Image (cartoon, grey):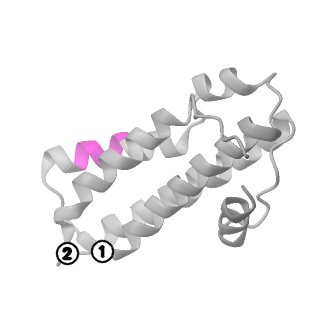
Amino acid sequence: MDDDFAYVRDRLPGYVPYGDEDALHDNDMRVRAYVGERLTSAQARVGALDAPLHATLDDVLMLCMFTDQVFVKNFEHAKLDGPLGAALVRSDRRLVTLGERADAIDSANESGFSGLLDEIGNQLAARREPEEITTP
């Protein structure tokens, strides 16, 4: 977890260890904003998108802009340290990493945009029930 936490914290000022509901909300907002900003920048570099890709981008950006109520409900009263906290941090790292991949998307290589959007959407859904990380 320490490597995952350091990776995310280095990119998201204010990212804190999961431990209470405030940390859950704050970290969730920071991660979604980070990914959304990178997707918006990629869209600007690519320019006009075909209708299906534009619709997919809009869908993923909506997921980035608004709190996932299922995610919050699943964890609002949970003990967020230990294995569950580590799982949330790992999920955040995956999203941050996917967001960083958007930095390579431009008009010359927009073919990967659709797949990246699918991966981000899938990871946002997967974080509703992350697999707990246990340490030996």
Dot 2: element:
loop
Residue occupying the far left of the picture = 50
Q: How busy is the neighbourhood of tag 1: few (under 14 within 10 Å), some, or many (20 plus)?
A: some
Is residue 57 in the magenta section?
A: yes
Magenta extent: 54-59
- At x 57%, y 28%, the residue is 129
Q: Position of residue 33 (x, y in %)?
A: 58, 55
Is residue 12 in the magenta section?
A: no
Disc 1 designates what residue?
A: 45
**Quadrant of res 123:** top left
Q: State the residue in front, 91 or 48.
A: 91
- At x 51%, y 45%, the residue is 64
Amino acid at pointer 1:
Arg
Amino acid at pointer 2:
Ser
Question: Secondary structure of the magenta portion, mostly?
Answer: helix
Determine whether, in the image, residue 130 is placed left or right of residue 10. Answer: left
Q: Position of residue 1 (x, y in %)?
A: 72, 55
Determine whether, in the image, residue 25 is placed left or right of residue 98. Answer: right
**Quadrant of res 56:** top left
Determine whether, in the image, residue 99 is placed left or right of residue 118. Answer: right
Do tag 1 and tag 2 residues touch (Cβ < 8 Å)? yes
> In the image, is residue 124 above or below residue 5?
above
Disc 2 designates what residue?
A: 107
**Number of dots carrying numbers:** 2
- At x 25%, y 53%, the residue is 115
